[in-house]
Amino acid sequence: MSKDASQTSFAHPRYWPTWLGIGAMRLGAWLPWRLKMGVGKGIGLLAWRLARRRRHITETNLRLCFPELSEARRAELVRETFIANGIGLLETATGWCRDPEHLRHRVTFKGQEQMARVQAQGKGALILGIHFSTLDLGGALHSLFFRADAVQRPHDNVLFNRFMARARAPYFDAVLDRHDLRGVVRRLKAGHNVWYSPDQDFGREASVFAPFFGIEAATVRMTSRIARLTGAPVIPLIFHRNPDNRTYTLEYLPPLEDFPGGDEVADATRVNAVIEQAIRKHPEQYLWLHRRFKTRPEGEPGFY
């Protein structure tokens, strides 16, 4: 498709809501910080009241993962999750539409020596990311310290996908399709770091079942396969908004030792345990709106 044809197609009325959303994100990115947090909270509370399907998914996930909490505390955590994800929309807009340098003073990065050791050896690392509400802002802030490629699922909306790809381009060296195993392997072997988040349900064919918060969850095999094919160390990255709602913490944990092993289920269990540990520190900031337990073992009824 020619450039002109592409521009004409994106002028079609079906894309007008997308253009409106893009405009809102660009505007939101430049709001004063306190107002930005307030608007994000308002969006989250509105979704909490109106998005009944997503609220049901969130309630189900939290009931499964935190059975030790009282019903009142879980209800409160559902509300906090929607607020955090509402703020996350404004954080995403900020990461996509502004230079992350203006936020350097808001970031504390712990464990940088973990990546420094890998880079000193001339290797690329597989960065184990997590789907927190701060995901895209975390990627932008990470680029202030270390460069990396990213693995993503293309968005179904072609216009929004183009906007997303262009927005991420300044702080990722390359953006790879999640199905492009060869590309990921090639980049790692060339010494590039690759940010990969394996904590979503990608279906039965791509997964093994491994415990996640004590629930058997479809967990992608690719993490251990990439590590086996490349010899790249797997370094978990934790990132969250601090309780002051003004600053952020990024932290590299030590690389997973003796990973991968000889058992894909055992490897997936280790990965899930690291992710679970990180989530428990700030559970409200995780993407509980996703149907993490959608795919069930044969014969087991669904949760949602």
Image (spheres, grey):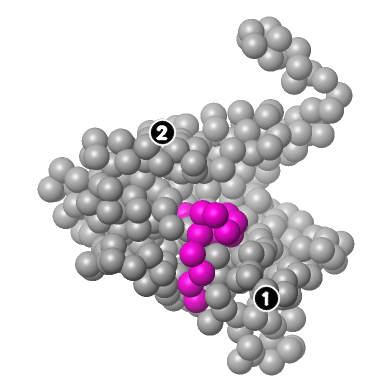
- The residue depicted at 55 percent of the width and 75 percent of the height is 216
CA separation, marks 2 and 1? 39 Å
Find the magenta span and give its range: 197-211
Residue 144 in percent (x, y) is at 36, 44
Q: Which mark is residue 174?
A: 2
SS label for mark 2: loop
* Percent coordinates x, y for residue 59 in the rendering: 73, 75
Residue 124 shown left or right of residue 58 in the figure: left
Q: Which residue is mark 1?
A: 300
Q: Residues within 10 Å of mark 2 (few under 14, many from 20)?
A: some
The answer to which quarter of the image holds residue 23 is: top right
Residue 229 in the image: x percent, y percent? Answer: 28, 48
Pinpoint residue 105: horizontal percent, then vertical percent: 41, 52
Secondary structure that dominates the magenta span: loop
Which quadrant is the C terminus positioned in? bottom right
**Residue type at mark 2?**
Ala
Q: Nearer the viewer, mark 2 or mark 1?
A: 1
Q: For the image shown, how many numbered marks are present on the structure?
A: 2
Between 144 and 119, the one lying in front of the other is 119
Counting other residues with Cα less than 10 Å from the Cα at mark 1, is it few (<14), some (14-19), or many (20 or more)? Answer: few
Residue type at tag 1:
Glu
> Is residue 104 among the parts visible in the rendering?
no
In this rendering, the answer to whether 114 lies above or below 3 is below
Q: Residue at x 43, y 58 (%)?
A: 221
Task: Give the secondary structure at mark 1.
Answer: loop
The quarter of the image holding the N terminus is: top right
Label 2 with label 1: CB-CB less than 8 Å: no
Residue visible at 31% across and 59% down in the picture:
235
